Image (tube, coloured by chain):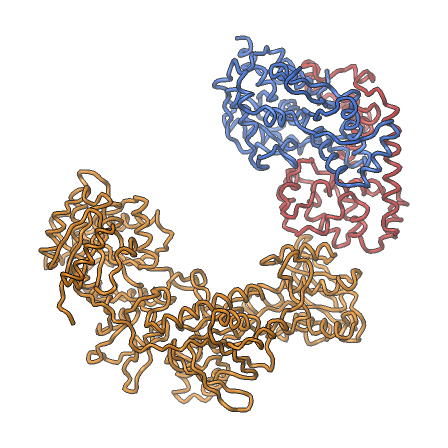
Chain colours: A blue, B red, C orange
Amino acid sequence: MARKEYAFYPGCSSQKGASASNYLVSVESMCKTLDIRMTEIPDWNCCGASISYAEAGELPRHVMNARNFALAETNLPGQDIVATCAACWLGARESKERLEHSDRLMADTQTALKEAGLAIKVIPEVRHMVEVLIEDLGYDELKKPVKKPLQGMKFAGYVGCQTNRPFGIAGESFENPMYLDKLIETVGGEAVKYDQKVTCCGGALAFSEPDKAQGQIKDIIEAAYDGGAEMIVTPCPLCQANVEVYQGQINKRYGTKFDIPVLYYSQLMTLAYGGSAKEAGLNGNVVQARKLEEFAGK
Amino acid sequence: MSDLNQEMAERYKNNFLKEIEEQAEMGEWVKMCMQCGLCSGSCPTNFHSGWDHPPQEIFMLIRAGKREEVLNSEGMYMCTSCYNCYVRCPRKVPVTHVMHGIAEYAYRIGRAPKAQPTLHLSKTFWSNATKYGRVNEVQLTQSLYFKDGLGAGIKKGLEMKDVALGLVKAGRLNPMEALGMGHKCKDIKGIHAMLAKAEELEARNKAAKGKE
Amino acid sequence: MADTKTAAYICKGCEIDQRVDVAALSKVATKSGKMNLVREHDFLCSADGVAMIKNDIETEGVTHAAICACSRRAKTEAFNFPTIAMSRGNLREGVIWIRPDTEEARETTQEMAEDYVRMACAEVKAMQVPPGNQKTGTVKTLLVVGGGMSGMTSALEASKAGYKVVLVEKNGALGGWASKLHKRVPTREPFKSPEDNGVADMVARIEADSNIKVYLNASIAKTDGAPGRFKVEIAVESGAVAQEDIGAIIQATGFSLYDANKLPEFGFGKTPNVVDQAGLEALAKEAAAAGKPICRPSDGQPVKSVVFVQCAGQRDASGTHLQYCSGFCCNTSIKQAMYFKDSNPDIDTVVLFTDLRTPGNGEDFYRAAQNKGVIFSKGVVSSVIPSGNACAVKFKDLILNEDTEAQADLVVLATGVVPNSGPDLDALAEANRLADGGDETAKSQVVAMMDQSVLNLTYRQGPDVPQFKHGFNDSHFICFPYETRRTAIYAAGPVRRPMDILQAQEDATGAAMKAIQAMENAGLGKAAHPRAGDLSFPTVRLEGCTQCKRCTVECPFGAIDEDEKRFPLFNESRCRRCGTCMGACPVRVISFENYSVNTVGSQIKAVDVPDEFSEKPRILILACENDAYPALDMAGMNRHEYDPYVRVIPIRCLGSVNTIWITDALNGGYDGVMLMGCKHGEEYQCHFVKGSELGRYRLSKVGDTLKGMNLETERVMDMEVAITDIATLPQKINDYAALIKSFPPSPFKGF
């Protein structure tokens, strides 16, 4: 038996072949080393994300998450739900809070769930992977398996929005959360100081209003470079994608020469734990993290 | 849809604040705003052009009874859901949710601005996500690009070609999804039944308000 | 009087003996200090060291002791010898802690220490033990003028502490402004709804209190005397005059609403449907009595919409109306808005404001009003236009940035407060001057102003407590809020600054405590704050007095009257011992037993001034004991180093600086003089209110003297120092020392 077991909610972007599939690969490697068993919630569905606000009403959004709660509770009793995606975590956690605070909402939700043959008894805790790492294991435990510290490498810990606001990681400030910097330091890297740590990457507006979003992304990358970072690290799939994949377009638009790899914390941890480039999902990065590839090969 | 708009306008007569309080999700928070402007100052998109009314103004327009101006505003759709306003509001008004709630209400009664790209994304995302229970990223992207017609879609597709190719190479975009081969839930039928019920209950609840 | 026997005690503790040659200091005390007895001790403030000094006093007959150890602000409990004169040489904070422990610094550090020993010896020889004020008054009855919430609170609190109180109210009933209120802003959890105004309860407690004697329909006809022995005449309705012996006074005369007739643009006077906050309270009381909703005055129909206009005639930058915020009107409007919403939620209730200010727990109250549906809009009202039974309120919406208007059945103006503080003494003095010259208008002005007098003091400096900003009675707004510039007379409540009832009650309680302290101190012949407990008082050598009146005019506390021969007449118990009179006296005939022209002058002269070839300048620092000296001590505690050529002498106030000290210093070969005093002006920090201002005024004339002596004007430098300037002060001293070193040595050295 693994030392920790959770009901895993990978979310749409972290499935195989989806935009954050390399996140999934690295999380799996990391969890293997840390002896954490993640069991996927059977037949889980989309959380609705924040962007569905304009089309979907209150109840439809909450029942989507409620279905996952019911499935987790039935199939993986007693296990906390753990999401790797910031938006999944936020959406699910928000639904949990709202349902628990409104009898009317809960009653209507149960009525709707019944249509799918489901019911909720107790909503499990909804947690982000980072919470599991920090709260259930702790930095000391995370440090123990480090075989190859990422000595001399400078990272900009880009926390972004949704793992930080509105819930955030317990004990962290909204304006300057430190957990990501601490994770970077735990695996031997250097966390640089820069001033766009919690700036929004534009979220869904990267699709709908690329002009606006790309302006924000540019600010973030510029600040990371100014802080002396060689790479950016993030806990959120949308932050990762937005900051990474538009660099070419931003370069065209603004005449910049951005070429900075954007990684997940789980990729760094996998590498520091001695994992291979493949295990860390480095092949999934659009902007190649050459320095890390070399490091993994050593 | 415009009938619903008319019905609501009549039901609440001149009291737009009450209309928002009862009809828009989290609308009951509007009256608690103390007009400090921290929300507008904290909004990442407020500093871009095209923002007709930042949150503080939306709140004040509601209190001033400016129904048309609020319901037609682009302001709510500038939200990136970054929750900066939400955590900074000294009155603990859930500004992000209030903005979402008003946007949804404007859309529900058919008053949301036409051709609003983020509203379009919202609609597309939700129908994509609920069709199979999970998001099909390729189809989502395609439907976004082709919203303005085939020509525009191809142009945009070409613009985004490098981005897409990069993702395909990195194994993060599966072209097969375009053909509907992507991710889906098993109990799609159950999900659809559940959502239908939820929508029915939601409509019933909202309609009951303001009539007691 | 016993024979004088002087002694110097030199402490070796706190590493003093490792940093300076203590034996050499003893030699200095004996030779140049000319002390009869010199002793060293390893640890002078220890029980053993203190016992040694006490033994010397008892068996050796020591009458004057120079304690050369730490700052005079340290170890005051150990070095407490009330029967002898005592000075302190500051070897620790003033020397070893501000100098580096290096071989090069050793010589100048030693010189510094030797000078401080010489200065302590010189000072103590010029001092006497103060005998205390012999003309003490021992009356312990408190007079409270004004029977509103503040006055009633002061009376009840003083009574609870066991003191008799005379409470004088000009109206026929107690309660003041609060009694006009239908309800008051909530004072307790959950701060969500208006409360009973609380007046009836207070009045009942006053009536049941045998310590409190109440005069209604009464005013103060005359206040004579001094703390502990005031003679107060109270004019009562019948025309009779009652006399009371009073120890201390609290003025709690409250405020009047700013006259809304000055705001015709807001429709006041044009329609009865525009009222001020008092007008709305009256409507609410009337409605409650009749069991009806609040009605429109024009036609008696229930109000369906009401607009509150905040800051009507206040916070006015143009200077036409009140410039200040009245502190409570936002909460009052919130409360009044609830009168409507609580009775009928459908009444449109709008508050137009620019900045909503809700002190205390007003924020909760504000939220409660929002929850009840009161609309708050950020807007500036330009005009209120009555038409028929309605009004159009025109305003600029500050968020939407547009001109708009709101319709209302009733408009309430939050007009702000004007203190009932009596006549402005400066204006009165000017009117008196013109009236004395025969000006008839001025004569009637004087009569009108005197008619407004609250206390009718017989003081030479005027009939009332001085005013400071915007006509409010004076108070030291940071350190001593209730203090006025009249000892044992305290201002409490909105007469001293705008405030709400809760704040006024807290204020009134504080003022009662201060008044009790003042009565007790007066009875013992001791000073009130800030030199609380000081037994010294100013004496004047009348045979030298030229009757120039500077002392009587400049005394910030009105302590000095004139006798029938026009000589100054000191009322010691009114005196705060700041020494402003001493600094003012051109013939130097005013002194305290323990602080005089001589105690400071002899220190200045005691310093060893090296000749012009030594390249060792001397800079005199006269530092205010309230802020600058503590700041210097703390710089020492933090080991911030500064120049070794300065010699610091603490002074009671910049106002006590007699220019003779400066000329003496310059004539004696000092290269520069730095004066460190508190900030003056509108945001003054001076503990004696006007002391530093008067001192600086006098010093502004020193420039001419310097020119006359053919010296650079920078050789005298005036600096504002706050107690918080701990880290920056040493740098400023060093900068000044560098400037002085850039000049040639003083040409007066060696004369």
Q: Seen in the image, is C238 located left or right of residue C71? A: right
Q: Where is residue C69 in the image (x, y as percent from the top left)?
A: 22, 51
Residue occupying the point 33% across, 52% down: C631
Q: Seen in the image, is C387 located left or right of residue C478? A: right
Q: Which image quarter holds the C terminus of chain C?
A: bottom left
Q: Which image quarter holds the N terminus of chain C?
A: bottom left
| Quarter occupied by residue B55 | top right
Along the viewing direction, whichever of C34 and C434 lies nearer the viewer: C34
Residue occupying the point 53% across, 87% down: C236
Residue C239 visible at all: yes
Along the viewing direction, whichever of B212 and B102 lies nearer the viewer: B212
Q: Seen in the image, is B103 located left or right of residue C624? A: right
Q: Where is residue C248 in the image (x, y as percent from the top left)?
A: 43, 75
Q: Position of residue C411 (x, y in %)?
A: 71, 68
Residue occupying the point 73% across, 19% down: A40
Give the number of callouts. Answer: 0
- Vertical relation: C146 (above or below) C507: below
- Vertical relation: B2 (above or below) A6: below
Q: Position of residue C93 (x, y in %)?
A: 27, 49
| Quarter occupied by residue B118 | top right
- Given the current orientation, which residue lies at the most extreme left position? C31
